[in-house]
Image: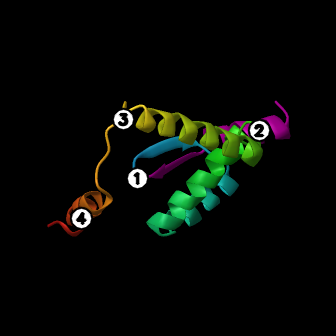
Amino acid sequence: MGVRGRRLLWIRSRRVELHGYHRVMTDHVQTLLREALSLSKQERADLVAELLVSLEGPAEGGHAAVEPAWAEELERRARRVLAGEASSEDWGEVRDRVARVLTGG
């Protein structure tokens, strides 16, 4: 086995143990993980979201596909309301109920 092969074997055998997480990582990835874990909860959530998007790729059709999809959904909902197939609630009552839930009241 050459030097490169031994180095790759060593890298593959490195394990990081942070909060019960065991995974083979390079030193660079371990450093990034430690830095990420030092972020606030919101910053970590933002980072995770961005990383997941980078793995999934852009949404099908991007922004141009989202607007027509929402317009279609709004039209479908409006038709249900006009046909009497959908129930509704008074906005003031909904707002008060949400406020009570949010304030623990």
User: Image height check: is 96 above or below 70?
Assistant: below
Q: Which residues are magenta?
A: 1-18
Q: Residue at x 32, y 58 (%)?
A: 91
User: Disc 3 residue type?
Assistant: Ala
User: Disc 1 residue type?
Assistant: His
Left or right of residue 30, residue 98 in this image: left
Select label 1 or label 2 by which is in front.
2
Q: Main secondary structure of the magenta part?
A: helix
Label whose residue precedes the other's in the sequence (3 or 2): 2
Callout 2: SS: loop
Q: Which residue is mark 2?
A: 61
Total numbered badges shown on the rendered structure: 4
Callout 3: SS: loop
Label whose residue precedes the other's in the sequence (2 or 4): 2
Q: Residue at x 75, y 39 (%)?
A: 8
Q: CA distance from mark 1 to mark 3?
A: 48 Å
Q: Which residue is mark 4?
A: 96
Label whose residue precedes the other's in the sequence (4 or 3): 3
In this view of the protein, which residue sits in the foreground, 50 or 37?
A: 50
